[in-house]
Amino acid sequence: MNFPIPDLNLSFYSSALPIILLSLTSIIALLMGVSKKCNSVKSAMWINNLSLLATLLMIIRLYGISGAASEMFLSGGFIAGRLGYFGQGLIVGVALVVSLLMGDSYIKAKFFRGEIIALFHMVIAGMLTMVATDDLITLFVGLEMASIGIYALIGYTSPTKLSQEGAVKYFILGSIAAAILLFGFAFLYAATGTLRISEISVAIGKISGHSWVELGAILTIVGIGFKMALVPFHMWTPDAYEGAPTGLTAFMATAMKTMIMVAAIRVFENGLSGVHGVWVPVLGFMAASSLLFANILALAQQSVKRLLAYSSIAHSGYMALALAAMSGGVRQYSVPSILFYLISYVVVSLGAFAIIMWLENERCENIIVDDLTGLAKQHPFAAVALSVFMFSLGGMPPTVGFISKLYIFNAALSNNLVGLVIVAAIGSTISLYYYMRVIVRMFMMEGSPVLGSLIKPKRSMVTTWIVGGSVAIILLLGTFLPESALRMAKHSAAEVSGG
């Protein structure tokens, strides 16, 4: 058998430079961790923040110079295109913001260690690989690079009984989901004879019987549904989110969701569009279940992180609704609406988790809703900002959450998914109760002196700038600038059909 020798030219290296840089800094950080002279919190923080900033600037430049058409390398193993760079930019931007917040938190010394930063950078490199590939095997390798590293980070960064329990549950369920996903890829390869996502759709049109393709599509949606935290594959999410340090929770809730959503767009829009009659009903059921059950279960949560975990599951349901709309006749709205929703959700979630991290300390590591009672009197800026985030998560105007849900509903209605839109509207109405419960606690109830003495956050310019910037972006994208963000989402979506 003859294997083609890959043409690794200068264009490939410049396009893949963000991944190469993070891989190199991961190795450097690991070597620093075993060095007596270089193993310090300050040095680990500098190499982490500077490398992430340099990587983000590279991605912005590559996005700016890339055209509507994508360029493939390594026989589809790597794609240089706007959709990939869009996902990479969001992921690295999240990682940089989380790193800045970690540097201002009480677990700074636990996070900025050589081995932790090495793991963190390999996780990000895996994510960047997954969002920029047309090959199923490369996609799976990138997914497992990210997932295995996250398992370790949850249990090892700040080891507690809760964090290790969450890591073990995530690892066991994640391993099962990875096996199911790989089994699905195997069936797709056996039926079509190709691992290229873009070629699978062409091959499906030439096959008379689709039974193996249909089985592969179902197994694939199950594996991806787990990573998206869709009901009924959501069981790991509350425990992992609650057990992990809050910075890592923010990273999982935003960067992991960005990674899996961009990959899902490629797989279902480019690869499995020929058997949409199989995976659309499954995806629709998972979306409806997530929108209802996650919001109902969130009503009973006291831990703020568990509440946001169920909120994250519900928001995955909204994006799954738009994924299901990619199978219809009017498909040009679906992918841009998902990308716009990702921008909205990432900004809102980072702002909310930034406030939670600011309130936490060694004595009060897991904030509950009751701890926020009377926050408006003690810290009015934090209370107002958190209210804006809750309003946006609930989809209330004039925030970007309202506009992003409007785009999702428009994409679904354009493809006659009226029943799913009704379910989404009911779920959104239910969610307003637990979002408003937080606001009522902060503004309309007196604070407890015991809890007030536990939560004594210090002044933080980093948190102030991040929270203030998040609030400004949420309000601007919800009022004056939604068209600009949607235009960028449309440009990024042009790489795949339906964009």
Image (cartoon, rainbow, N blue to C red):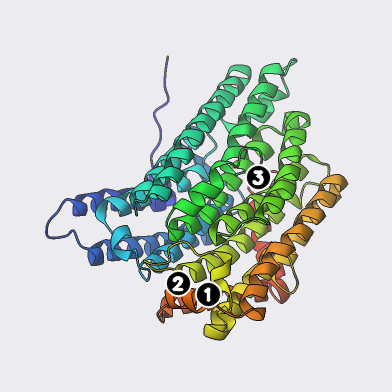
Residue closest to the eye, 108 or 100 = 108
Q: Which residue is mark 1?
A: 467
Q: Position of residue 82 (x, y in %)?
A: 57, 53
Residue 201 x, y percent position in the rendering: 68, 30
Residue 358, numbered label: 2
Residue 54 visible (yes or no): yes
Real-space Cα separation, disc 1 to disc 2, in angstroms: 10 Å
Tell me the quarter of the picture where residue 394 sits.
Answer: bottom right
Relative to residue 244, is residue 448 drawn left or right? right
Q: Residue at x 34, y 63 (%)?
A: 107
Residue 92 drawn above or below residue 141: below
- Kind of residue sitting beneath label 3: Val
Q: Is residue 73 above or below residue 429?
A: above
Local SS, label 2: helix
Residue 7, position in %: x, y?
40, 36
Query: Percent from the top left, x then y, of residue 198?
Result: 62, 34
- Amino acid type at circle 1 is Val
Task: Label 1, secondary structure: give it.
Answer: helix
Q: Residue at x 62, y 27 (%)?
A: 219
Query: CB of mark 2 within 8 Å of CB of mark 3?
Result: no
Does 19 sit left or right of 238 as displayed?
left
Residue 472 seen from this side: no
Q: Residues within 10 Å of mark 3 (few under 14, many from 20)?
A: some
Residue highlighted by disc 3: 496
